[in-house]
Amino acid sequence: MTMTLWSSVATAEIKLIGIGTLNHSAKGENVDLFPDSTPLENGIPANRLGGLGSGFAYAGGGTFLALPDRGPNALSYNRSVDDTVSFVSRFQTIRIQLTQSRGDAALPVEVNAELKATTPLFSAVPLIYAAPSQSLPGGTPRLNSDSKFYFTGRSDNFDPQHPSTNDNNGRFDPEGLRVSHDGQSVFISDEYGPYLRQFNRATGQLIRNIKLPANLAVQTPSSMGADEISSNRSGRTSNKGMEGLAITPEGTVLVGIMQAALVQDASDPATKKLVRLIRIDIASGDVQEFAYPLTDGSGVSEILAVNSHEFLLLERDGAGLGDRNPTAVTKKLYRVDLAGARDISNLNGADASAAVVKKTLALDMVKALASQGIESTQIPAKLEGITFGPDLMVKGHRLHTLFMTNDNDFKPEVEGPNRIFVFGFDDGDLPAFEPQKIRSAN
């Protein structure tokens, strides 16, 4: 690195310093390292690479983990399962190298990303899968064995006799991802349950299901989101479950964020724009709920710990590249503080609304990207994954990094590639920032 790099980013703001993409692996364009390439129910290969921005987590060194959601379901083929397929849930391990840009590049940092591993997620205990029907094959993954039962994105892989949070359901829609303090496991949140699960990072085997409050579950699950919404009076809104996940720097607390108001909150004018934060003590399992007020976007996509009690929340609209409305307007990071906030676990309506946390704007991504010549029509509609990354040292100065990724719905031809936006900031831009402490970083 040179002093030129530092002088171009050392301003009193969080500033874009580099953009990278990840579109291919050693196997070829738009495929990952999953051991099966045969077509899914909709004809798309089972090893399709995409959707990596649903969750993004730093694992130390130059290693990052990227999380696709329930899979490629943008192609219409069967409405009874919302066009979902038996895409096996997985996370990707990526190596990212940051180097000084050459010549007269518009941004000072070059971002080079390489896919290193694909880790499918499974349980050692049998899971519930849909039986074959006249219009659909069964939902059991081809990869299953006597000791490995894989989670998939098929929306009908559940037991209708239990709430949506039934631990044995085979359906999984991953959205939030964080690495444990010891670096040996990962925590993943989802939208179907919502679930919060811990997996072995090396093998992908389920370690445990972390119990979440009962008020987040729907009592009458369905394979069709519209039917779930119309059939339930409480619980998470379909496809808007635990969208984001944070882990505190010392690795003792998880904080999940629901994407939108719960059904029971949305029905009350006092709380229709209230989104619940779920704080979980990892060791004890103790849970608290806090209220976040939506002000600009249609929902919250991610949460990231600044320190043990302050968090960044990504609030956004659905507009931008890949959406019917191609002009991005709202992609904002807000900072909130849970210290002293009131637990709303047993509150509803006006009482819950009165307890919302205060929020301050930390970064307006649309403005930040526009300042670097990126038009609003070229900003991905689904900016979703955020994580802090490694520091850059420049002639004795330290620059912190913030990474942001997009979910391209496995449609690079429409929504563009899996992009990696890197922002730089110093201590004055984000006061009291503490990086996550991962004991066994690699």
Image (spheres, helix red, strand yellow):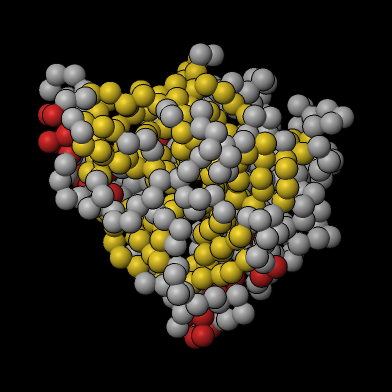
- Residue drawn at (16%, 25%), measured in percent from left and top? 2
Q: Is residue 442 visible?
A: yes
Compared across the picture, whether 59 is left or right of 160 comes to: left
Give 151 or 134, whichever is nearer the viewer: 151
- Residue drawn at (59%, 69%), measured in percent from left and top? 288
Q: Position of residue 10 (x, y in %)?
A: 16, 41
Residue found at the very far right of the displayed protein:
146
Number of callouts? 0
Give 83 or 109, whichever is nearer the viewer: 109
Q: Is residue 73 visible?
A: no
- Residue drawn at (34%, 46%), measured in percent from left and top? 320
Residue 254 vs 383, above or below: the answer is below
Residue 189 vs 374, above or below: the answer is below
Give 137 or 54, whichever is nearer the viewer: 54
- Residue drawn at (21%, 25%), measured in percent from left and top? 1
Compared across the picture, whether 307 is left or right of 364 comes to: right
Q: Determine which quarter of the picture holds residue 69.
A: top right
Q: Determine which quarter of the picture holds residue 332.
A: bottom left
Compared across the picture, whether 357 is left or right of 215 comes to: left
Q: Position of residue 30 (x, y in %)?
A: 49, 23
Q: Position of residue 34 (x, y in %)?
A: 63, 23
Give 310 or 375, whichever is nearer the viewer: 310
Residue 261 vs 98, above or below: the answer is below
Q: Position of residue 136 (x, y in %)?
A: 76, 38
